[in-house]
């Protein structure tokens, strides 16, 4: 594990620079005299965590900062001390010690700290939550209360992981999977009272999974089979912040990654991509690296 301890009493400019290095691009402004800030980073294989102290300041991201940053993850925010206000879209979460919220790194957001605040931020790759919550919206900037059993267990797991200096790559990925699984009940919307749009969306996802290995899987085929126009299908996915073709590609890549984690070294990578609908190996390799940060061959070597 790599632990990078920053200055205990950093100046405002130093502190913001450290935030940008650890968490991606943010703007910030002080709210009143008495600013204080510090940050500690914890890295071990797939786990990337930061403990952020802040007082009398506001961090925020516009579209410009989002475009300059990696949006392939969520900030899973654990409030350790004090209070903060986390905002995204039209939602606002006021956090006290023990509370949790989720913030999408691919969307503008705002974090306000008026009093001494300490937060732990876990970068949770988008793929982990998409695997758990493919059938529902991801309710960002909603408070998960400290007395929720999920909040308690998740925080214990993450804090415990920070103490494990000998964690392997597989163990670090298991922690991310566990956090995504633990958060699922609190994040998932109730299926009861699901409207017709939700039912059609659920059917479309089921159809995609059923035919995910087919080269012919396209938005036009999905729309035809579930009985809606292509335009309506695009609108259904847009309500979830998704693009149909991109969702199909990412779903295929996630399934390829599952196979690669168990693949033998002599198994041809081109065949794995072909089995899941990628007819061009170069395209498969490029798309895989864009999603997971490494080539298919490098990804497989991590698990051999």
Image: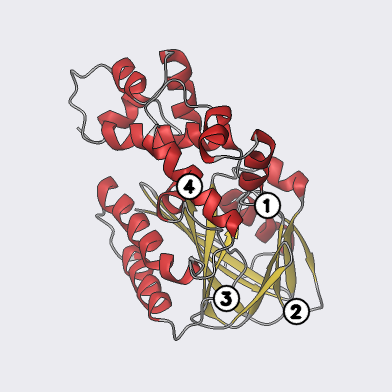
Residue at image mark 2: 34
Which label is found at residue 203? 4
Comparing labels 4 and 3, the label whose residue is closer to the camera: 4
Q: Contact (CB < 8 A) between labels 4 and 2?
A: no
Q: Relative to 226, is 175 on the left or the right?
A: left
Where disc 2 sits, the SS reads loop
The residue closer to the viewer here, 280 or 204, is: 204
Rendered-image quadrant of the C terminus: top left
Comparing labels 4 and 2, the label whose residue is closer to the camera: 4
How dense is the environment of label 4, judged by Cα within 10 Å: few (below 14), some, or many (20 and up)? some
Where disc 3 sits, the SS reads loop
How dense is the environment of label 1, judged by Cα within 10 Å: few (below 14), some, or many (20 and up)? some
Measure the alpha-carbon separation of dots 4 and 2. 54 Å
Measuring from the top left, give residue 139's x and y in whole percent: 58, 64
Hey, which quadrant is residue 284 in on the image? top left
Measure the alpha-carbon separation of dots 4 and 1. 27 Å
Which label is found at residue 143? 3
Q: Please say whether residue 174 is visible from this viewpoint.
A: yes
**How many numbered circles does the render carry?**
4
Name above or below for residue 69 compared with residue 296: below
Hey, which quadrant is residue 52 in on the image? bottom right
Residue at image mark 1: 107
Q: Contact (CB < 8 A) between labels 4 and 1?
A: no
Where disc 1 sits, the SS reads loop
Comparing labels 1 and 2, the label whose residue is closer to the camera: 1
Q: Residue at x 34, y 53 (%)?
A: 1
Whichever of callouts 4 and 1 sits on the residue coming sooner in the sequence is 1
Hey, which quadrant is residue 151 in on the image? bottom left
Measuring from the top left, give residue 76's x and y in whole percent: 51, 63
Whichever of callouts 1 and 2 sits on the residue coming sooner in the sequence is 2
Whichever of callouts 3 and 2 sits on the residue coming sooner in the sequence is 2
Q: Residue at x 69, y 37 (%)?
A: 231
């Amino acid at each position: 594990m790599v632990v990078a301890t920053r200055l205990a009493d950093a100046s405002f400019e130093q502190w913001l620079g450290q935030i940008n290095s650890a968490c991606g691009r943010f703007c910030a402004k002080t709210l009143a005299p008495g600013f204080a800030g510090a940050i500690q980073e914890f890295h071990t294989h797939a786990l990337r965590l930061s403990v952020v102290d802040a007082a009398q300041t506001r961090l925020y991201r516009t579209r410009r900062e989002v475009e300059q940053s990696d949006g392939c993850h969520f900030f899973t925010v654990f409030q350790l001390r004090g209070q903060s206000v986390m905002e995204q879209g039209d939602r606002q979460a006021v956090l006290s010690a023990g509370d949790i919220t989720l913030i999408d790194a691919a969307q503008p957001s705002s974090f306000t700290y008026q009093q001494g605040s300490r937060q732990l931020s876990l970068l949770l790759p988008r793929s982990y939550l998409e695997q758990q919550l493919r059938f529902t919206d991801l309710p960002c900037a909603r408070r998960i209360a400290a007395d929720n059993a999920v909040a308690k267990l998740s925080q214990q797991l993450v804090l415990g992981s920070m103490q494990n200096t000998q964690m392997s790559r597989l163990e670090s990925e298991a922690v991310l999977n566990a956090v995504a699984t633990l958060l699922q009940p609190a994040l998932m919307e109730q299926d009861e009272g699901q409207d017709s749009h939700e039912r059609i969306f659920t059917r479309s996802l089921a159809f995609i999974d059923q035919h995910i290995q087919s080269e012919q899987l396209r938005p036009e085929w999905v729309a035809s089979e579930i009985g809606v126009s292509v335009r309506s299908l695009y609108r259904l996915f847009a309500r979830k912040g998704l693009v149909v073709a991109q969702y199909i590609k990412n779903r295929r890549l996630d399934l390829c990654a599952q196979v690669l984690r168990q693949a033998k070294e002599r198994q041809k990578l081109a065949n794995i991509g072909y089995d899941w609908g990628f007819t061009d190996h170069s395209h498969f390799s490029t798309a895989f690296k864009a999603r997971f940060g490494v080539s298919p061959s490098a990804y497989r070597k991590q698990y051999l």
